[in-house]
């Protein structure tokens, strides 16, 4: 009897003490994209794109855009809540966009509040928008139902070819904090009814400094990480040749010979000729193409690295990699003092496999 | 308090002694009791309803007519019927009379002759209905204990097959037998079973399930701790594993034990199939069980608390199916689950042909109508229907009931704390299962205590050549079943094309 | 003095493996990387191994003590130090176990409050977990061992999820190896020790092991297993997070679970945390069991009643730790006590016992 009474009390407490807030799926307004626009130095505009699922089945989802101006990012969210029919939740946030003007002033205040929110995942895409985020989100695109879907898919598949593989919340915060490497993000641009990758946005800390144009993204990715996709077009004796990257590997070698330390970036690329109009692919010719490719890639690479050094940014993480090979290296000091003048050599090894489709 | 059946004192055998006369006058109150004089000397009395009249006319009456002066002992010798008894013990007379014996009295003696002439009304042996298998034997137990024992002895023709009889039930006086193989079954387990059965104090035993409920280690548990089966081949199989079986007169099912939880999910047909297929089916069944118990609670938990977990593409499907439904997920789920239970219950109470119609009508008509009316989402309808289907893959009927019942506490806890609630509910059940025993053997079998050897016939069913030892749970007196090595040596390792 | 437990209450020697590793893995593993990388950076994995080695030495010492005493620590204390000093030491050990119970429970509830249900009351989840603990401990030591075994079975598949963060790993974060000084490594090892605590519960359940003297190899294997798990967990975090970001991440393991991206499930932390209940359950059960057994020994209180008392203390104490700072502080204090107990007190008893047995032999 006493036992039964105790169990009864337990069950009563179980039901009465439950104060957990329920977030039933259809009673929340999901946010799929959160963007920020620059208004003026003290004011930002928060824009969210939220999917609207139509009641009728088998009709495509639509998305709606809310926007609000405020001084801090938290405050924009507060103001946006005032417009939304259901409470806004960030749990399914897919992408975080920043206007380029805003990014010039630093995005870390926004990003750090986001990364501290346990309801957000680690895999939220991030990108910089050349132009207004609001316009990009509000525009109608014939290719997909919603703008948010478009942006996600675009970022996802391009990260295999030309963009760095991971440009998400985690990697941005990680590289931002990491001494001796600066983060990079994709740069998107909005034209009438399309969104295009414009290049790779370069950062100094959390401040947007410039970008690698689309044409050079392939070379950047070669220097940035190992990958096995992407195409590259270059000129051989007046003819255009396109090669497809089958596998590329990059390795940095740091030679700390005082007084003149040196960095060698070794790139090995295995490629396949996919298009070479007007060229007869003899063995000799292929060798010639290989040599050209080697030359073009190392020249392009050198000019990219030179530009980074001039801008005093380190998207390739050369200082981190030097630090990982030399245990006495002071990364802070190097980043500040030596990086700009560090001689960087790029050695490219190319191997072109003859493929069947072009003769 | 749990064991109140067992703790009560034994039924008192010393009830008020009747005299033979009083007994007979009591019996005469019934219409089917017949008493008449034969050859002017003998008084013959019996229950017409219990006695095979052919025996009376063919074997008993002619002998009585031969020589009326003979003593009862002489009659006992010449009667062509076995186990004839001459006694004056009134309790014996009463029980025999009521079990279809003919009572023959002679004046001036207080002893009387009891001639068994039981009329055996019984059902034909039919094919098993609840545990039907495509392959394998198709006999099932019937209500007659003797027939059932016959079915068992045919399969295990060894003298070590012991049958211990006990009588249970103040009113029903049911014969309950404990069957085991001496030298293989653990003696302690046999004694435990016999003790528990003889400690039962109850007025009626209608079926073996009565016995099961009263001898289970914890009869407050939702989990059945003994397996009931209607297949004599299954009983013979588990007997040779070293388990014991309990049969009871008037019941077409046998109880076997000790068991483990995984045994409830192994169909006997697993042993008739090749081991790959059987193992695959077992895994499927285990998956089905977890699906059946957890799918609806997971639906409720995820939709109520953790929408972040749903991948985006699935998310839109879920939202569009949920939108416009007036109830929160928990109410929706409970309504649908109860509907399914209702259909099942209605289907099983009705005659089989009507029942089928109800199933189809209910399933299709009510389901689609509920979705059309916007009362439930079609995603949940699929989930619930699949879960119901999955619960029927459990081969043991009692366990599949348990599984369906378990869903409801899980549903409630999912509503309270989402996934954490499901984990908590699971923890409660796990602690309960860890404490549970079947005839003193740990219930969650080869998992804890971990017996890798026994896993060969638990989650999987490996080939018979691997099953050389009896399961550890039964604590067999003779753990080795057969010696497979001897057989294996005969075949040398042959090279290709040799 | 309690009699030796009956044989059917004992468990086989190999279960020591599961008990030891379950006791060592608790809430700590969700966030230990941050603390050790603070001192040793990318070399923190060396500290994981170093302090693991020291645990082996301690396990060896514990076995020497127990083999000589042939009973649990309560009885050994009494035999060594007499009724009053031994008794007060026993009382301290009861408190020690209760403290660990409080910390384990409260930090788990804390994690749940941060990651799953920010608006859940502390008492609510504590109550539910303690009711489960009560039911489990009522079943006796065997049930606790069963929970330990199952917690390993449930917990191990979670390691597979490390595959997702490994896709995004930077292996050069680990290089260069050994760029930290030995003193840094030792400092990190000291911090790491706190995560390995729990093996000392061996003192309490030793009499419940069948052929307990032979179980030593299983205890060592258990420690090796734990070290491997910590090492693997640590390494994945060290290649996924840069040192600087790790210092900002309170629960790296949970952040790593967030990266899970499967077609039917994403954001695994909700799932993982729910499964984590089974990892901490045997911990609290063991602490409550050991403490209530100690009470039985000390005050000849029925263990059922002692258990209720212990659970009530744990429950009330966990309510007094209201926020993250207080939980953190309590963890640090208990960790320090634990550190001194295992590194100073255990060798002390060992030496004391050695001397006493020598003296007795002479006498």
Image: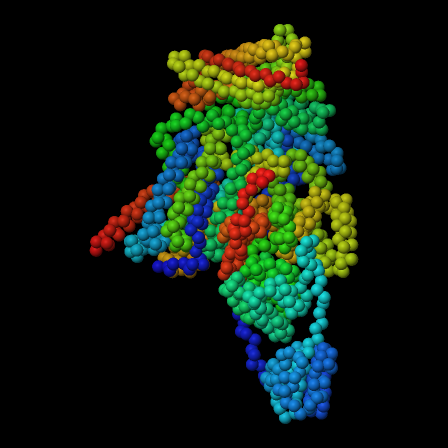
Query: In x, y percent, where is residue B104?
Result: 67, 86
Query: In x, y percent, where is residue B106?
Result: 66, 90
The one of A117 and B4 positioned closer to us in this rendering: B4
Q: Quadrant of the C terminus of chain B?
A: top right
Query: In x, y percent, where is residue A290?
Result: 58, 12
Residue at the top extreme? A238
Residue at left 66%, top 18%?
Answer: A356
Q: How is the image coloured?
A: rainbow
Judged left or right of residue A1, residue C308 is left
Residue at the front extreme? B498
Whether C51 is drawn above or below A39: the answer is below
Q: Quadrant of the N terminus of chain B?
A: bottom right
Judged left or right of residue C74, residue B293 is right
Judged left or right of residue C247, residue B211 is right
Residue at the left extreme? C363
Residue B15 visible in the displayed image: yes
Residue at left 65%, top 86%?
Answer: B75
Within the image, what quadrant is residue B11 found in? bottom right
Whether A265 is drawn above or below B383: the answer is above
The one of B267 and C33 positioned closer to us in this rendering: B267
Within the image, what quadrant is residue B130 found in? bottom right
Query: In x, y percent, where is residue A185?
Result: 57, 22
Residue C104 visible in the displayed image: no
The one of B496 and B430 positioned closer to us in this rendering: B496
Residue at left 69%, top 30%?
Answer: A64
The one of C80 and C4 positioned closer to us in this rendering: C4
Residue at left 51%, top 42%?
Answer: C156
Whether C259 is drawn above or below C292: the answer is above
Whether A257 is drawn above or below C183: the answer is above
């Amino acid at each position: 009897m006493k036992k039964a009474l105790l169990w009864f009390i337990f069950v009563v407490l179980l039901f009465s003490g439950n104060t957990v807030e329920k977030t039933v799926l259809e009673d929340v307004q999901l946010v799929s994209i959160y963007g920020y626009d620059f208004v003026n130095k003290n004011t930002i505009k928060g824009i969210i794109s939220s999917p609207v699922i139509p009641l009728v089945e088998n009709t495509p989802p639509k998305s709606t855009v809310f926007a609000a101006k405020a001084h801090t990012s938290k405050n924009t969210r507060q103001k946006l809540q005032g417009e939304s029919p259901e409470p806004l939740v960030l749990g399914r946030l897919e992408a975080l966009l920043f206007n380029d003007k805003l990014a010039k002033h630093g995005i870390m205040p926004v990003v750090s509040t986001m990364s501290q929110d346990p309801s957000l995942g680690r895999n939220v895409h991030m990108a910089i928008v050349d132009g207004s985020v609001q316009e990009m989100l509000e525009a109608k695109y014939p290719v997909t139902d919603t703008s948010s879907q478009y942006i996600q898919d675009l970022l996802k598949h391009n990260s295999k070819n030309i963009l760095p593989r991971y440009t998400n919340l985690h990697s941005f915060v990680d590289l931002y904090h990491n001494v001796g490497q600066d983060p990079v993000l994709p740069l998107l641009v909005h034209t009438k009814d399309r969104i295009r990758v414009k290049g790779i946005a370069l950062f100094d800390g959390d401040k947007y400094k410039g970008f690698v144009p689309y044409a050079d993204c392939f070379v950047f990715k070669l220097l940035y990480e190992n990958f096995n996709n992407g195409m590259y077009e270059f000129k051989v004796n007046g003819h255009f040749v396109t090669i497809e990257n089958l596998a590329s590997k990059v390795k940095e070698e740091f030679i700390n010979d005082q007084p003149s330390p040196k960095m060698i970036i070794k790139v090995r690329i295995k490629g396949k000729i996919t298009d070479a109009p007007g060229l007869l692919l003899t063995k000799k010719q292929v060798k010639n193409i290989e040599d050209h490719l080697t030359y073009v890639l190392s020249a392009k690479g050198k000019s990219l690295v030179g530009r980074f050094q001039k801008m005093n940014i380190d998207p390739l993480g050369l200082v981190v990699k030097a630090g990982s090979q030399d245990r006495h290296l002071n990364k802070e000091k190097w980043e500040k003092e030596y990086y700009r003048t560090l001689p960087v050599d790029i050695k490219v090894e190319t191997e072109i496999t003859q493929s069947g489709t072009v003769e | 308090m749990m064991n109140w059946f067992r703790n009560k004192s034994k039924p008192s055998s010393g009830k008020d002694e009747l005299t033979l006369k009083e007994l007979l006058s009591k019996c005469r109150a019934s219409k089917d009791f017949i008493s008449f004089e034969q050859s002017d000397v003998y008084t013959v009395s019996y229950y017409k309803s219990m006695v095979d009249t052919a025996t009376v006319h063919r074997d008993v009456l002619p002998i009585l007519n031969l020589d009326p002066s003979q003593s009862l002992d002489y009659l006992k010798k010449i009667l062509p019927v076995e186990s004839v008894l001459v006694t004056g013990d009134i309790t014996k007379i009463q029980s025999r009379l009521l079990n279809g014996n003919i009572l023959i009295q002679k004046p001036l003696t207080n002893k009387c002759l009891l001639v068994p002439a039981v009329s055996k009304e019984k059902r034909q042996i039919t094919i098993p209905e609840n545990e039907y298998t495509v392959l394998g034997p198709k006999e099932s137990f019937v209500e007659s204990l003797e027939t059932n024992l016959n079915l068992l002895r045919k399969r295990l023709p060894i003298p070590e097959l012991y049958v211990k009889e006990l009588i249970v039930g103040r009113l029903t006086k049911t014969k309950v037998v404990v069957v085991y193989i001496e030298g293989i079954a653990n003696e302690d387990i046999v004694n435990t079973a016999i003790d528990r059965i003889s400690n039962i104090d109850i007025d009626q035993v209608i079926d073996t399930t009565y016995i099961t409920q009263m001898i289970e280690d914890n009869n407050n548990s939702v989990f059945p701790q003994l397996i009931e089966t209607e297949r004599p081949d299954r009983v013979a199989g588990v007997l040779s594993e070293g388990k014991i079986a309990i049969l009871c007169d008037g019941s077409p099912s046998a109880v076997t034990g000790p068991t483990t939880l995984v045994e409830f999910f192994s169909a006997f047909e697993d042993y008739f199939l090749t081991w790959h297929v059987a193992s695959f089916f077992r895994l499927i069944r285990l998956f089905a069980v977890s699906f059946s118990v957890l799918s609806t609670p997971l639906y409720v938990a995820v939709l109520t608390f953790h929408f972040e977990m749903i991948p985006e593409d699935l998310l839109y499907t879920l939202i569009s199916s949920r939108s416009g439904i007036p109830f929160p997920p928990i109410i929706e789920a409970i309504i649908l689950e109860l509907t399914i239970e209702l259909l099942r219950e209605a289907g099983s109470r009705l005659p089989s042909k009507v029942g089928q119609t109800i199933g189809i009508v209910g399933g299709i008509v009510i389901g689609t109508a509920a979705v059309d009316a916007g009362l439930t989402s079609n995603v949940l309808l699929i989930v619930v229907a699949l879960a119901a289907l999955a619960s029927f893959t459990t081969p043991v009927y009692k366990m599949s009931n348990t599984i369906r019942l378990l869903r409801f506490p899980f549903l409630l806890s999912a509503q309270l704390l989402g996934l954490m609630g499901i984990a908590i509910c699971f923890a409660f059940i796990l602690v309960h299962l860890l404490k549970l025993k079947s005839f003193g053997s740990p219930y969650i079998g080869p998992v804890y205590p971990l017996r890798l050897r026994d896993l060969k016939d638990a989650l999987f069913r490996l080939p018979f050549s691997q099953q050389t030892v009896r399961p550890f749970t039964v604590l067999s007196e003779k753990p080795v079943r057969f010696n497979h090595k001897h057989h294996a040596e005969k075949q040398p390792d042959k090279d290709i094309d040799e | 003095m309690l009699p030796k437990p009956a044989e059917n209450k004992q468990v086989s020697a190999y279960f020591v493996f599961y008990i030891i590793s379950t006791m060592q893995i608790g809430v700590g593993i969700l966030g230990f990387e941050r603390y050790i990388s603070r001192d040793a950076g990318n070399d923190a994995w060396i500290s994981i191994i170093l302090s693991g080695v020291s645990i082996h030495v301690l396990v060896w010492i514990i076995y020497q003590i127990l083999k000589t005493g042939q009973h649990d620590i309560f009885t050994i204390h009494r035999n060594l130090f007499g009724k009053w000093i031994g008794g007060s030491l026993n009382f301290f050990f009861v408190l020690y176990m209760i403290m660990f119970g409080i910390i384990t429970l409260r930090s788990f509830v804390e994690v749940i409050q941060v990651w799953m249900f920010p608006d859940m009351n502390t008492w609510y989840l504590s109550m539910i977990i303690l009711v489960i603990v009560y039911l489990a401990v009522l079943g006796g030591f065997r049930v606790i061992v069963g929970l330990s075994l199952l917690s390993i079975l449930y917990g191990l598949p979670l390691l597979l999820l490390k595959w997702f963060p490994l896709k995004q790993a930077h292996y050069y974060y680990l290089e260069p190896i050994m760029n930290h000084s030995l003193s840094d490594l030792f400092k990190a090892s000291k911090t790491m020790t706190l995560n390995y605590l729990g093996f000392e519960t061996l003192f309490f359940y030793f009499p419940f092991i069948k052929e307990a003297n032979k179980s030593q190899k299983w205890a060592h294997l258990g420690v090796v297993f734990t070290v491997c798990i910590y090492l693997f967990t640590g390494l994945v975090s060290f290649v996924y997070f840069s040192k600087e970001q790790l210092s900002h991440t309170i629960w790296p393991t949970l952040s790593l679970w967030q990266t899970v991206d499967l077609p039917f499930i994403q954001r695994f932390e909700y799932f993982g945390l729910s499964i984590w209940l089974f990892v901490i359950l045997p911990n609290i059960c063991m602490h409550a069991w050991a403490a209530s057994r100690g009470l039985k020994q000390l005050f000849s209180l029925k263990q059922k009643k002692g258990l209720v008392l212990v659970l009530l203390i744990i429950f009330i104490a966990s309510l007094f730790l209201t926020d993250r700072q207080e939980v953190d502080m309590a963890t640090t204090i208990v960790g320090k006590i634990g550190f001194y107990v295992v590194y100073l007190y255990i060798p002390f008893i060992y030496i004391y016992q050695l001397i006493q047995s020598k003296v007795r032999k002479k006498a």
